[in-house]
Amino acid sequence: MKLNRILAHFLLTVMAISLPFGGVRSDEPKNHDFDVVRTEDAVPPYQLPPLLVTVEGHPVRTPQEWVQQRRPQLLSLFANLIYGVVPEPEIPVRTTFEVIRTDPAYMDGTAVRKDVRIRFENSKGSAELQILVFTPKGTTNPVPAFLLHSFGGTRDDGHDASPDKKGFTRNGLPLGEFFSRGFGFVVVPQSELVKHNEVEFLKGVHPLFYRTGQSFPKANEWGVIATVSWSASRALDYLETDRDVDARRVVAIGHSKMGKAALWTAAQDERFAMAILAQSGCGGAALWKRNFGENLEKMVTRFPYWLCRNAAKFVRNEEDLPVDQHMLIACVAPRPVYVASGSEDLWADPRGEYLSAFHASPVYRLLGRRGLDSEASPAVDRVVGDDSVGYHNRAGGHSVEMFDWLRFLEFAGKHLQKP
Ligand code: GCU
């Protein structure tokens, strides 16, 4: 019996990691996107805005000055210029949670699966977000969990509501590895409150927040990524009520566009214990000012509303941006952050992703943690960072592979599992 279970578990795990998602495995941009910087010698000279100097020009020397002055300034700049602020609703939004289904014997009895409906409502409309919460069987205490910003849906409507049927990460998910290490797993779909390439913002959650007469977000108001991040914070609100999960040990994780969202989520919402950014690239961990691979112009023309409209003002003008993405990673400090690249994923700028983590490190040190010490990127497949900032550049392209999952689990295990 035990052997059968182990075998079933193994097969499910292998199935989950071996199925490609819609064949999207390469980072190669579409034909029209080859007009971007793809070699180091073509990176323009640039200067990063100073991390530890306030807008008023004062040096930031103490943890208090960082926490009370600089970090709030940076978050406000990122909100108003890059991702968009979530406006105060004119009429309060009522939020309700409902566990609509429980499967106590998920994946051959190794886990419990809960389908949870989160509903938002006021007199301007309503919207619903359906999340999945998996917790390993046989644990008595609340477990730490990964909260995945997911490309795939979570509804049983013939799509991919079951992680062992792939879809959540583009190439499957070794869920058994999470359960056997005592981690829960939460799936938050990206496109229920806002569509992937939203252009109208008349459906989903935005109308609940419009002022009278408003029908489109203002230039500094939330775009698609900010809305995805907001969903994750609302999912965490639910987790705070779920006794199977320890809401103080939840990792925000995402790949690619979802990695961009995971960074914005964890930077703002300090309840998240950790961030894992897999190939988050442009608008994620990569530095704007390097202009390497996908750049601001590509992003705002191909996906006009992923960011807020103010961001477009800096196209070909990145030197005027008062922020760069290392500052957003620094806003996660002192909580642990792990950045992962792919050596062939040039569209996401592996070098820029590393440099962001490296240049965020002074804030980790200011807050009493260790960061990355070397400006040089590590060799392919080598893991660096023995404390709160971790990094690897896996051989290969744009996907999350078993190599990545295991490194993420090791990093999270080190920081979040109680001895
Ligand atoms: C496109 C986009 C990237 C994004 C990626 C993805 O390639 O340009 O910014 O990360 O899609 O989400 O897979």
Image (tube, grey):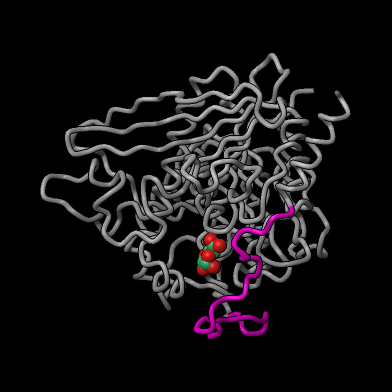
Residue at 70% over, 47% down: 16
The extreme top residue here reads 140
Residue at 48% over, 38% down: 269
Above-or-below relation of 305 to 164: below
**Left or right: 43, with 157 as reference point:** right
Q: Determine the main secondary structure of the stretch shown in magenta.
A: loop
Q: Nearer the viewer, residue 11 or 57?
A: 11
Which region of the structure is painted magenta?
18-43
* Displayed quadrant of residue 120: top left
Residue at 83% over, 57% down: 382
Above-or-below relation of 375 to 30: above
Q: Is residue 160 visible?
A: yes
The extreme left residue here reads 213
Q: Nearer the viewer, residue 48 or 184?
A: 184
Q: Quadrant of the C terminus?
A: top right
Residue 338 x %, y %: 68, 48
Q: Quadrant of the N terminus?
A: top right
